[in-house]
Image (tube, rainbow, N blue to C red):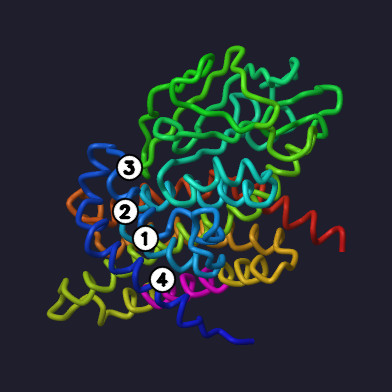
C-alpha cells in the first residue's frame, strides 16, 4: 500500500495551508466572535479552485480527487472550522451529487457557477421531525404541468442564508415512504414562495451560517428535478456517504489545530522548574493525542482513496466520520486540560476549537447513525 501523495496533491495541500495560515487563521477569532460570514474568503477559495476540488474543469472545478479534497479541507478547517464547513457543504453535498446525478443542462447552468465559487449551495434534508429519519419528512413536491410545486420547511441548513441554490428533498408519494422522495434544485434568492429564515445563533462554527428554508407553493421547472422521480432517498444517502469524508476532514483540521496549540503551550508553560511537556502526565497526554489524530487521518484518507478508485466506501466513510468526530471531541477536551485554566478563556484558541468540535459528532449523520451504518454493513456480510 502506497501512502505517498502525488506532487499535484501535495501542491494543493501547500496552497491551502499557505492560504489558511496567511488569510484565514488571522481572522478566525473575529469571525467566531461576530458570527460573520467570510464572503471574501469564500470568493478566494473559489479562485483557488477549492469550492469544487473534485469537479472536472469543464464544470468549473479543479479536476482533482477526494484525497486532495481531504488534504485541503484539513488545512482550511485547521485555521477556521466555520470556513471549512462552508467549503465542505459546497463540495460534498452540492457539487458531488450534481456531478453524479445532474443533467447536462444542470451541470452547465448550476454546477459550473457553484464549483467555480461564483455561487454557493446548500443541502436541504433535515426537518423539525425528520433528522436521522429522513423517510419521515413532510415536505412535499407535486408536479403540475411542467412545474414542480414545493411545500414544507427545512431546518439547520448550513449555508442557507448565503446560498444561491438548495438541493431540497421532498416526498412525491407518501405511501411509498423513502421510495417516494425526490430531489429538487431550488433557487433561494428572491424566489417566489421561498423564505430563508434568520441565521441560527450557534455554539460553534459561527462563521458558517445555518437557517431554515420555508416553501409555500414554490415553483420550479420539472427540469430542476435532480435524478429520477422517487430517486431522492438514494441521492441523499449516496451524497451523505461522500459528505462524511468532508466532515471527517473538518474534524481532523480542528483537532490538528488544538494539538498544535497544546504542544506549543506545553513547551512554554513551566511548573516545578521545568516545562510541563517534560512531566510524564502531559507528555503521555500529547502522545495519545498524536496517535489518535494519525489514526483518524488514515481512516479518512482510506475512505477518500476508495471513492476515488470507484470502490464501495459507505462503511469506510462512516467509520472515518465517527472516529474522527469523536477523536476531535476528545482531543479538544484534552487540549483544554493541557492549558489548564487558560484553556477555559476565550483568549486562547483551544476554547474555540472545543466549541467547534462538538458539531462534527452531530451533522451529516450523528455518531449513533454512523454506528448503525457500520453495523448494517457488518450484519450483511
Between marks 3 and 1 in the image, the one whose residue lies nearer the viewer: 1
Q: Residue 8 location, x and y as percent?
A: 46, 77
Q: Quadrant of the N terminus?
A: bottom right
Q: CA distance from mark 3 to mark 4?
A: 23 Å
The residue that disc 1 covers is: 48
Q: CA distance from mark 3 to mark 2?
A: 16 Å
Which residue is rendered at x = 25% and y = 51% of the image?
28
Which residue is rendered at x = 29% and y = 57% of the image?
350
Query: In the picture shown, does residue 138 fall above or below 34?
Result: above
Between marks 3 and 4 in the image, the one whose residue lies nearer the viewer: 4
For label 4, the crowd category at 10 Å Cα-Cα, with few meaning under 14, some 14 to 19 and many 20 or more, is: many
Q: Residue 310 location, x and y as percent?
A: 72, 67
Mark with earlier residue (3, 2) = 2
Q: Which stretch is magenta?
A: 286-298
Mark with earlier residue (4, 1) = 4
The residue that disc 4 covers is: 12
Tag 4–tag 1 contact (CB < 8 Å): no
Answer with left or right where residue 43 lies relative to residue 184.
Answer: left
User: Foreground residue, 217 or 262?
Assistant: 217
Mark with earlier residue (3, 4) = 4
The residue that disc 2 covers is: 44
User: Foreground residue, 148 or 307?
Assistant: 148
Quarter-of-image position of residue 336: bottom left
Amino acid at each position: 500500500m502506497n501512502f505517498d501523495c502525488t506532487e499535484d496533491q501535495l501542491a494543493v495541500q501547500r496552497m491551502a495551508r499557505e492560504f489558511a495560515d496567511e488569510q484565514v487563521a488571522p481572522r478566525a477569532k473575529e469571525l467566531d466572535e461576530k458570527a460573520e460570514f467570510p464572503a471574501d474568503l469564500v470568493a478566494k477559495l473559489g479562485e483557488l479552485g477549492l469550492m469544487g476540488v473534485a469537479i472536472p474543469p469543464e464544470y468549473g472545478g479543479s479536476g482533482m480527487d477526494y484525497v486532495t479534497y481531504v488534504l485541503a479541507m484539513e488545512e482550511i478547517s485547521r485555521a477556521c472550522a466555520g470556513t471549512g464547513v462552508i467549503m465542505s457543504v459546497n463540495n460534498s453535498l452540492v457539487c458531488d451529487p450534481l456531478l453524479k446525478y445532474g443533467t447536462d443542462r444542470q451541470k452547465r447552468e448550476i454546477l459550473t457557477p457553484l464549483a467555480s465559487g461564483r455561487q454557493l449551495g446548500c443541502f436541504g434534508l433535515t426537518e423539525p421531525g425528520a433528522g436521522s429519519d429522513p423517510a419521515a419528512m413532510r415536505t412535499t413536491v407535486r408536479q403540475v404541468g411542467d412545474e414542480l410545486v414545493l411545500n414544507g420547511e427545512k431546518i439547520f441548513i448550513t449555508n442557507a442564508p448565503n446560498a444561491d441554490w438548495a438541493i431540497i428533498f421532498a416526498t412525491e408519494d407518501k405511501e411509498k415512504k423513502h421510495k417516494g422522495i425526490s430531489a429538487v434544485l431550488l433557487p433561494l434568492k428572491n424566489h417566489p414562495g421561498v423564505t430563508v429564515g434568520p441565521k441560527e445563533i450557534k455554539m460553534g462554527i459561527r462563521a458558517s451560517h445555518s437557517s431554515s428554508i420555508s416553501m409555500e407553493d414554490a415553483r420550479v421547472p420539472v427540469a430542476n428535478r435532480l435524478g429520477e422521480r422517487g430517486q431522492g432517498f438514494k441521492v441523499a444517502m449516496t451524497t451523505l456517504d461522500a459528505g462524511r469524508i468532508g466532515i471527517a476532514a473538518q474534524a481532523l483540521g480542528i483537532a490538528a489545530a488544538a494539538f498544535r496549540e497544546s504542544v506549543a503551550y506545553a513547551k512554554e508553560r513551566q511548573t516545578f522548574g521545568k516545562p510541563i511537556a517534560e512531566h510524564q502526565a502531559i507528555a503521555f497526554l500529547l502522545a495519545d493525542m498524536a496517535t489518535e489524530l494519525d489514526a483518524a487521518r488514515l481512516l479518512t484518507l482510506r475512505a477518500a482513496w476508495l471513492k476515488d478508485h470507484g470502490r464501495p466506501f459507505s462503511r469506510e466513510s462512516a467509520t472515518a466520520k465517527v472516529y474522527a468526530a469523536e477523536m476531535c471531541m476528545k482531543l479538544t477536551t484534552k487540549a483544554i486540560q493541557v492549558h489548564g485554566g487558560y484553556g477555559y478563556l476565550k483568549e486562547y484558541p483551544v476554547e474555540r476549537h472545543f466549541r467547534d468540535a462538538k458539531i462534527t459528532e452531530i451533522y451529516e449523520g450523528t455518531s449513533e447513525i454512523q454506528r448503525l451504518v457500520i453495523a448494517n454493513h457488518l450484519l450483511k456480510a
